[in-house]
Each structure stands twice: as C-alpha cells, then as structure tokens.
Image (cartoon, rainbow, N blue to C red):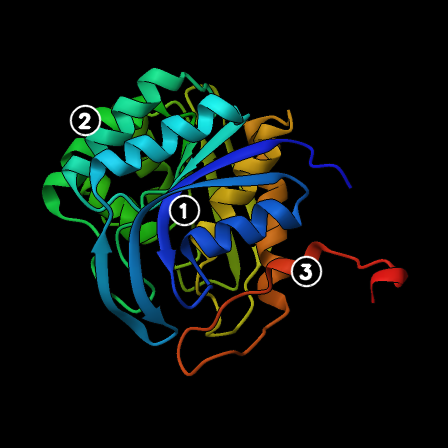
Amino acid sequence: MKPKSKVLIIAGSDSSGGAGIQADIKTVSALGSYAMTAITAVTSQNTTGVKSIFSIDPEEIFNQILFTCRDIKPNAIKIGMLHSSKVIASVIKALNKIKISKIILDPVMIAKGGARLIDDNSIKILKNKLIKKVSLITPNIPEAEVLTNIKIKNVEDMILAGNKLLEDGAKNALIKGGHLKNKIVHDVFINKNEIKIFKNKKISTKNTHGTGCTLSSAITTYFSCGKTLKKSCELSTKYVNSAIGSNLDYGKGHGPINHLSSIIIKKKFR
C-alpha cells in the first residue's frame, strides 16, 4: 500500500514505546501515512513512570525540522512534548520557515504517572505564541485547566475552557474528557462557529498510556489526507477507543494501547 500522505511529528521519545514519538509513528503508519520525526527529548520511562528526561539541543531540533521538510515536505505536522521555552522558540522559528498550514498541537504537560513534563515559563510562551500558529489544540482536562485556569468538572466546564482557548488565539480546540468519571467519554470539539461533542463508551482499564499522543497523531493523519478537522477528530476518537478496547495488558503500571487495531494483515504476510 502506498502511503496516503506525509506527516512530520515533533515530539519526545518514550523508551517504553507506548507514548511519544513511538506511539506517533505507529499511529501514522497504522492509518496508512508516512511518518517523519524531529525528536525534542529522550525519556527513560516505562508503564510505572518517568525516570529521566534528556533534552535535545534546541538548534538540533530546528535542524531536524528544517532539513527533513526541505527534502520531503509534510502534508501536516503534529507537535507533542515541548518541555522548555528554548525548545518552543526553536520550533516556532522552524514553522515560520517551512510554512505548513495544517498543524495539530497536543500540549503534553503531565505524564500518565503524574510526572510534570513542562515548566511554567514554557506554558506561558505556548499560550502566547504557539497556540495562534496551529490548526487545532488537543488538551486533556488537566492540561485545559492549566491553560485556562478553569476548574473542569463537567461538559459545560469543558465548553467554557474551549471558549477561553479560542479567546487566547486558538482556531479550533478539542477538549478530551477521559479524566471525568462518566460511563461515556465526551470529547468537545469547538471553534467560533460550532460545538460538536463526540461520545464513546468508556472502557474500564488501566492500560491507557499514550492515548493523547495517539489521538493527536490520528487527527493529524486524517487531516493530512484531506478530511475536515471535525471529521478527523470524530474518526480519531473511534480509532483510539478501538485501540484501548484491545487491552494489551503490558507492564506493571499504565500499559500501552494497541495501535495496530486498525490493521488487517493479508494472508500472504502471516
């Protein structure tokens, strides 16, 4: 099968393979597109938590983005872990040069195990400068609370936070509702013209490591292939729900989801 589009991923590496660059590549590939990467950090982690984070030099991140895009121009870009103000500045500088219009930002701030992955100054720059440059921002509830200073307890609060992000310069926002204790997961897609709520049955499992990375990469992939943002979000929530439903049960903590749930292997390759 020939890849349907090309996607550049700007994010950190997860040594356990469940989140970050590894989850992004698996997702983009599983949905039929070609993945390229610019690595922002190398983490030592497993399903129980993050042991350490090694930062990549911001100039090297800039070089990865620019040199890759000059040769293979991506149809869309997914941005994940940006852990320092210098890293965010280098990414913005690169985006200004390559001029790609379809950009999805997953504002990775807190790891599944609770480790903080970004400092306060970086959050400020992300809010003031980067958010205006992207097509869509995809915070979960804890991230949306940090970005908007709104305590989110229900869907109405999610809509309120989404509107605050629009006021701050976001074109579109998808507030992910997985942290609320409901039997149905509500994900709120919002822009100045519409609000759409996607509903999926909540699957009871501890194995949800990398769901945010996976969702944003899936959205980027569908969007890169020409689907609307709203349709990309709808299809991606279904894909992630299916991947969670496989319940791999790897590791002693928050295990990974099954990125390959969308793939049917032809008989000759079995």
Q: Are marks 3 and 1 in contact (CB under 8 Å)?
A: no
Rendered image quadrant of residue 62? top left
Numbered disc 3: secondary structure = helix
> Alpha-carbon neighbours of circle 3 within 10 Å: few (<14), some, or many (≥20)?
some
Q: Are marks 1 and 2 in contact (CB under 8 Å)?
A: no
Residue farthest toward the left in the current orientation of the protein: 121
**Closer mark to the observer between disc 1 and disc 2:** 2
Numbered disc 2: secondary structure = helix
Q: Which mark is residue 261?
A: 3
Identify which residue, 5 or 182, lies in the foreground: 5
Which mark sits nearer the N-terminus, 3 or 1?
1
Which residue lies at the image location 68% right of the left edge and 60% below the top edge?
A: 261
Q: Which residue is mark 2?
A: 128
> Alpha-carbon neighbours of circle 2 within 10 Å: few (<14), some, or many (≥20)?
few
Looking at the figure, which quarter contains the C terminus? bottom right
x%, y% of residue 105?
38, 36
How many angstroms separate mark 2 from mark 3 (CA)? 38 Å
Which residue lies at the image location 39% right of the left edge and 74% below the top edge?
A: 47
Identify which residue, 261 or 241, lies in the foreground: 261
